[in-house]
Image: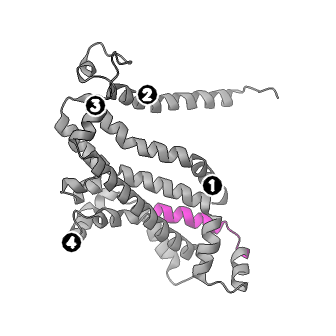
């Protein structure tokens, strides 16, 4: 089949290539710098390819810092935030989509309004609350404030609205309760969007810097973004080690997205169609 090249198609391809280059250049530069010997990172003029590639920066970062501990903390926090956000968001979205109760519209409006509130506004009251509960420097102190995600409730609610009620009616005929309908009917039918929401939540929790920075003072409780900030402050001009830390910190996200890319694209597409 002969391809017809139209101006919109060419423009979209050129735009996609430009955006890909803009996204890839900093990543390639970080990888390139991390493989250079430290003295070579400050040479002028700047060169792209290292003259003598080495993994010394990665070895130094792993041996000198608490990178392994930070990885574990970020993994625990991100997994807990993702799991709890999915549970809370699914239950809230199902309630708004399938049940009627007094104040339903007002409450949903407040949730929508919550999307517009910058997280920074809540830092002080949240920190006071975590301090009062004794959750500073704990996993739960990092996790719980990140579980409430109004935008995820909105996305799932719109998706549930597009699912036919006939499936629920059939389940009720078989004697299923609301809990059984949610977990045995709605959740399996919403798997693509749930995977997409889970991936976005995981990435957001992994990259979150401000709240873990505020609520942790113990170095052993730091997550990757907070730890990397300390590394940059202590390493000074050791650019290779800074870039090696950044590459190692972002590598899990690239792996997760590569593994679930198809599910993310399908979930976002289904949300757009059904919403």
Mark before the other along the chain sequence, 1 or 4: 4
What's the distance in space between the residues labelled 2 and 3, CA to CA? 20 Å
Identify the residue under disc 1: 272
Mark before the other along the chain sequence, 4 or 2: 2
The span shown in magenta is: 150-166
Q: Where is residue 12 in the image (x, y as percent from the top left)?
A: 62, 32
Label pair 4/2, CB-CB below 8 angstroms: no
Q: Is residue 242 visible?
A: no
The nearer-to-camera label among 2 and 3 is 3
Is the residue marked by circle 2 packed among few (<14), some (14-19), or many (20+) residues within 10 Å? few
Q: Does residue 4 lie above or below 163 as drawn?
A: above
Q: Where is residue 159 in the image (x, y as percent from the top left)?
A: 61, 63
Q: Is residue 7 visible?
A: yes
Query: Which secondary structure, mark 2?
Result: helix
Quadrant in which the N terminus is drawn: top right
Query: Which secondary structure, mark 3?
Result: helix
Mark before the other along the chain sequence, 3 or 1: 3
Decide whether residue 156 is among the magenta residues: yes
Identify the residue under disc 3: 57
The residue positioned 42% from the left and 28% from the top of the image is 28
Identify the residue under disc 2: 25
What's the distance in space between the residues labelled 1 and 4, CA to CA? 42 Å
What's the distance in space between the residues labelled 3 and 4, CA to CA? 38 Å
The residue positioned 20% from the left and 53% from the top of the image is 219
Quadrant in which the C terminus is drawn: bottom right
Mark before the other along the chain sequence, 2 or 1: 2
The nearer-to-camera label among 3 and 1 is 3
Prevailing SS of the magenta stretch: helix
What's the distance in space between the residues labelled 4 and 2, CA to CA? 44 Å
Identify the residue under disc 4: 134
Colour scheme in the image? one colour
């Amino acid at each position: 089949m002969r391809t017809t090249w139209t101006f919109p198609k060419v423009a979209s391809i050129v735009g996609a290539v430009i955006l890909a280059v803009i996204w890839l250049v900093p990543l390639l530069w970080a990888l390139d710098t991390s493989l250079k010997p430290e003295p070579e990172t400050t040479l002028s003029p700047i060169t792209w390819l290292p003259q003598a590639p080495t993994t010394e920066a990665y070895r130094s970062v792993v041996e000198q810092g608490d990178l392994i501990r930070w990885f574990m903390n970020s993994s625990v926090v991100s997994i807990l935030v993702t799991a709890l956000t999915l549970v809370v968001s699914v239950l809230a979205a199902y309630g708004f989509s399938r049940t009627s109760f007094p104040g339903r519209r007002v409450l949903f409006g407040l949730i929508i309004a919550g999307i517009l509130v910058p997280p920074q506004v809540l830092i002080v009251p949240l920190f006071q609350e975590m301090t009062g509960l004794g959750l500073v420097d704990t996993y739960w102190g990092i996790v719980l404030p990140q579980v409430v995600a109004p935008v995820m409730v909105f996305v799932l609610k719109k998706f549930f609205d597009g699912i036919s009620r006939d499936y629920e009616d059939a389940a009720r005929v078989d004697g299923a309760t609301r809990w059984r309908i949610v977990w045995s009917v709605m959740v399996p039918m919403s798997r693509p969007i749930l995977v997409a929401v889970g991936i976005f939540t995981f990435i957001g929790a992994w990259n979150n810097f401000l709240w873990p920075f505020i609520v942790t003072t113990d170095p052993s409780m730091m997550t990757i973004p907070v730890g990397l900030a300390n590394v940059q402050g202590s390493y000074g001009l050791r650019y290779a080690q800074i870039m090696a830390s950044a590459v190692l910190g972002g590598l899990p996200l690239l792996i997760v997205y590569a593994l679930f890319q198809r599910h993310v694209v399908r979930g976002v597409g289904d949300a757009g169609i059904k919403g």
